[in-house]
Amino acid sequence: MTIRKHFALFAALALVGSRAWAHPGHAESGLAHGLAHPFSGLDHILAMVAVGLWAAQLGGRAVWAVPAAFVGMMVTGGALGMAGVPLPLVEAGILASVLVLGLLVAGAAKLPLYASLPLVAFFALFHGHAHGAELAAGASGWSYALGFVAATAALHAVGLGLGWALKRASAEGVVRVAGGLVSAAAVALWLNLL
């Protein structure tokens, strides 16, 4: 089985499982709550998928390094959120991530790793903080973090899979349009907050 098929299988299982655990009465489990949290907001979903799409566009080492940088810094942000350490402008940072990541995908921006890794890591800090701050009382921080890391990796894998499939089908234009739609959604979400 190829790595792409593994990614697709993992993403499908994670998406199905987290939806089933997201029903009321199951949130007491740190793992289930963590798996469900990234799916609780369109802003998180769009940003995570956009990271995968952009990594697929960049190719090479970025395919694993960009999502890994995001997940690594997201864990740091999650720890800060769980510890109650304040981070200013969390929601603005999350919406900015959706806008910027969408624009990077729409423009098929080919930033070098030394620029792309810190950029996604910066945005991941906000996403992680939001996840960590939502830890349910009495839930295990470790299992909760494991859940939101697995869900985030699944969403990255969805973006990577879509990006690879569309590249293989010579439909890179569709990926760019998707990036534009992600950015448009960020603007709509921002206007909704006003």
Image (cartoon, rainbow, N blue to C red):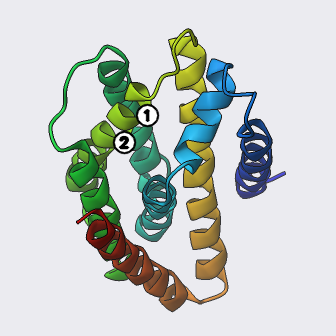
Q: Is residue 185 left or right of residue 63?
A: left
Mark 2: give few (<14), some (14-19) or many (20+) Cα within 10 Å: many
Q: Is residue 107 left or right of residue 152?
A: left
Q: Is residue 95 above or below residue 179?
A: above
Q: Would you name the residue on which mark 1 appears?
A: 131
Q: Amino acid at mark 1?
A: His
Query: Residue 22: image x %, image y %?
Result: 70, 40
Please state, as top left, top right, bottom left or bottom right, where the C terminus lies in the image. bottom left
Q: Amino acid at mark 2?
A: His
Query: Residue 137: image x %, image y %?
Result: 51, 14
Which residue occupies the extreme left position in the image? 88
Residue 109 visible in rendering: no
Q: Would you name the residue on which mark 2 appears?
A: 127
Residue 35 visible in rendering: yes
Mark 1: give few (<14), some (14-19) or many (20+) Cα within 10 Å: many
- At x 27%, y 49%, the residue is 91
Q: Quadrant of residue 32?
A: top right
Q: Is residue 85 left or right of residue 162?
A: left
- At x 29%, y 41%, the residue is 126
- At x 71%, y 57%, the residue is 4
Q: Is residue 17 above or below residue 145?
A: below
- Contact between labelled residues 1 and 2, with CB atoms less than 8 Å apart: yes
